[in-house]
Image (cartoon, helix red, strand yellow):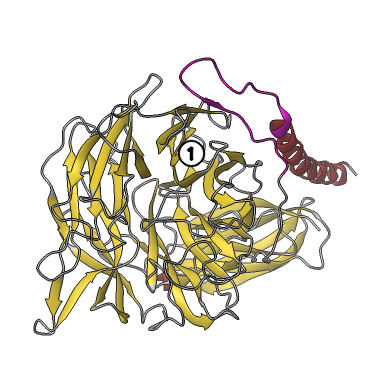
Amino acid sequence: MRAKASVIFLLLLFVSFQVSSGDRNQTRLNRNVSQMDGSNVSFIPYNIAPQSIVFTAPLAQGFATDSILVGPEVFTGISGFYDFKTNGETNEYIQVDALNPLNIHVIDVQSDSLDQAGATTRRTKYSFSTNGGLTWELSVDVPNVRSGFGVLQLKDGAAVISNHSTNAGNRLDANLYIDVAPLAATFNEYSHPNPTTRPFGIWPQISVYNNGNVGLISRRNVSSTVPPETLYYSVYTGGTQMSDRTPLWISGMNFIGTVGSNARYHIANNNQGRVTVIIAPVNENDTLENSKIFEITSTNNGTTWGPVNTAFAPYTVNGGQDTVATAGGSFFVYKKNTNNWYLAYPITTDNLFANGKLQLTKSDGTHTTICTVADVGGATTMSQSLAFVFTIDFPALGWSADGSTLYCVYSVVKSDTSNGGFNQRDLYIQYSLNDGTTWSTPVRLTNTPTIDETYPSVSLWNPGTSGGNYELNLVYMKDPGVGPASFNGNGTLAAPSRNQLIFRKLTGTNPIGIGNNQNILKDYHLAQNYPNPFNPVTKIEYNLVKAGFVSLKVYDVLGREVATLVNDVQTAGVKSMEFNAENLPSGIYIYKIKAGDFTDTKKMILVK
């Protein structure tokens, strides 16, 4: 009876935790905070206006490959009708706190009305989880005025957000917002001083340095008919304002046509004072009439900058008959505590979709192919135009905590078309265990012919150290209305639909993503089952250093054997077994492995 009571108590505790999380959401939403703090720094409280959440697409369940457990889709609470998330680069929408990995922060730009372009209702919304992504707090508008193209990083566990918005000075500019404490969701605003001779900034990108400063780059906010393209740099070092912006890069050519304003750029640092900015202008063409990609580096946290270098230049193939050039979105990261950076972007031969590739350029000047259009079954032609979208597009990069694994998630335009005639998009993941030199086989994360999943973003830091579990945390847009409703250049717009910001966690063992057992890990390991709690099916993964007899059994809390999952000789490598508890009652169960001299046990919870 005592054991049974313990089981019931733990189950009630689990349910109570879920309920209390919801209550905590409501408490945070209703608390009373002042609107301004009386200084030059704006005080942005919770938006307490009621928001209706409409689920318009079913959430997918988790699944497993031979060594990756892809968790179920989890709705972050951020939803709306705005479906144009980027202006050419892949932005950072999710970050895991390395100081407390259960704390996960996300943002998204949304419009809560059918005003798809967000002329009045477009906001940058912030949400967070304190339990590793299982549940999410209600979202906050940062700030509660029209804003666009937000990016997210962390500073001592607190969210740092930048976007272009109408600031306290009543001007549209690239501004910075820093939470007053981790998970407080109360943001101070930091604007630039009133400029006299320079235009305001838009489409910002940020990087938090090891000295606590925040570097910000933005493009000057002018019409595409005013030359030349200029990228500005500014920094937050404390106080109530950003530094004045200074020109970091100026194009040598005037804008071309109406798209001359769509430069792509990134900023990242190595946590040791080295900062690099990547610039991919659409108008800085070379003799092949295609865009170059430039880089400029500082070795003192942005105090001074070195010369402008070329990171990528178009080149010819097939005896000079075809030109290879960049196309689509890009992403840029450093490997922390090294001088090595990595830039992922699509390339194509003479703008032919069928010849497209996703390429990685490293700081040592080497180029490697992540995947080709043929590798992922991408569309070779599009039924209708998709502005600023290539077949393989919007790559997002992130690292494991120990630096052993570089992840890449990206969007692929498929040949499937919706009722509106637009191609549908799905997401894929690959990983590299040798700093991007070679890449794993692509794994398809979504497969929904009538739903768009795109604009992926992965955390720059993800848990994962030798001997433990590895995980990748990502978010993406899930939209039942296939095709762009907010913006499509001069192309046709799709009918509006409410999309959701989806969170997903991928887990595996040392390191994540070892496919087909091509690597044998140095240690025996029994992973935590996933999902946990579960109903009624869960996965149990383990690693065998060498071939031998293996026993994997499940027991109830009284020590009685309820299932034998393995009782046989197995080869070395990563294994995954499914446990179906359909005929068992709710409660705590224990699974135990024996392989040679190795034994281990773990607990799991069945909740029906």
**x and y percentages locating residue 161 in the rendered image:** 46, 38
Q: In the rendered image, which quarter is residue 410 located in? A: bottom left
Q: Position of residue 93 (x, y in %)?
A: 47, 49
Q: Which residue is mark 1?
A: 97
Q: Residue at x 51, y 67 (%)?
A: 484
Observer-nearest of 227 and 335 = 227
Describe residue 412's horizontal placement relative to residue 141 as left or right: left
User: The N terminus is located in which quarter?
Assistant: top right
Q: What span is in magenta?
A: 29-50
Residue 102 x, y percent position in the rendering:
56, 41
Q: Amino acid at mark 1?
A: Asp
Q: Residue 508's spot in the image, x, y percent?
A: 49, 59
For image coordinates 23% across by 62% down, the residue present is 256
Residue 279 left/right relative to 121: left
Find out whether residue 176 is within the magenta segment: no
Secondary structure under badge 1? Answer: loop
Residue 597 in view (yes/no): no
Q: Residues within 10 Å of mark 1 (few under 14, many from 20)?
A: many
